[in-house]
Image (cartoon, rainbow, N blue to C red):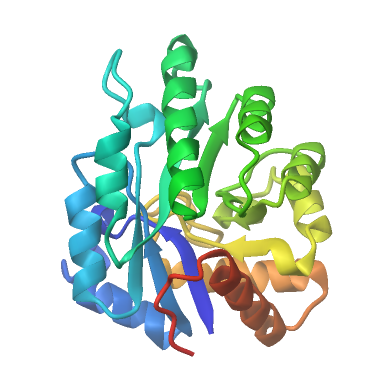
Amino acid sequence: MLVDSHCHLDRLDLAVHAGSLDAALEAARARGVGHFLCIGVSAENAGAVKALAERYDDVDCSVGIHPLDLQPGEAPALDWLLDELNHPRVVAIGETGLDYHYEPEAAELQQQSFRLHLQAASITGKPVIVHTRGARADTLNLLREAALPHAGVLHCFTEDWEMARAALDLGFYISLSGIVTFRNADALRDVARQVPADRLLVETDSPYLAPIPYRGKPNLPQYVREVAEFLAMLRGESYERFADQTTENFMRLFPLAHVKR
């Protein structure tokens, strides 16, 4: 059994499934995907991801504000976030984090928001899902500052082994997406070989970043199978063992998730 540990089910391009999310999820289930974590990115989609988690037994969700979805000059309110997190299908916080690649001018606001999400993680005990791009030092510094007693995950990891090792030392997990299959991703494949087996997750980040051989097309949860098969081969493991291990890791990191095995 596989888990797609990070997907945006409310944003999927469903053309290949005749517009049906039911059909898209069933296609993933037919390929061995037994659970989905649908990710919140804004105040506007918090209700949508919770509704999807309520609708499907094998879907849980997170709630948070992506650094590129922040309202100009305004960090989210802690009371709002804590209220949204108080829901039985919300098993994680985020995605949150820092992205200086697209909005370096918003660094201060992003840091304020990230700190708020980390504070919510400290209050609730729920794991935090971290997006980081072009902000390696500040991301690690804020995670060290927060000193969370429980783990989180650096999702769709694209950094080098030095950053991965620093995050692992802080208790975080590393999640890999279809990017690891791309031709120019040698440095990321080096990371993928070194992450300890019990700290690795797989994801699609669908509808973005479809793996080879679907690169350039809309990504779907069913393609997490390609990511897992590629990583198992890269690490010299059987697919079955790799799938079981990453599912165990997901359940350990997100203990409130409603995973049925």
Residue 65 rendering spot, x and y as whole percentages: 34, 37
Name the residue furthest top: 105
Residue sitting at 62 percent across and 46 percent down? 157
Total marks in image: 0
Question: Does the rendering let one see residue 148?
Answer: yes
Residue sitting at 72 percent across and 44 percent down? 167
Q: Nearer the viewer, residue 16 or 29?
A: 29
Residue 219 rendering spot, x and y as whole percentages: 40, 58
Q: Nearer the viewer, residue 32 or 223?
A: 32
Residue 15 rendering spot, x and y as whole percentages: 22, 63
**Is 100 left, or right, of 195 in this rendering?**
left
Question: Does the rendering let one see residue 220?
Answer: no
**Is 194 left, or right, of 170 in this rendering?**
right
Residue 159 rendering spot, x and y as whole percentages: 69, 38
- Residue 150 quadrant: bottom right
Residue sitting at 78 percent across and 58 percent down? 195
Residue sitting at 75 percent across and 72 percent down? 233
**Is 177 left, or right, of 114 in this rendering?**
right
Query: From the viewer's perspective, is residue 107 above or below residue 176?
Result: above
Name the residue furthest bottom: 261
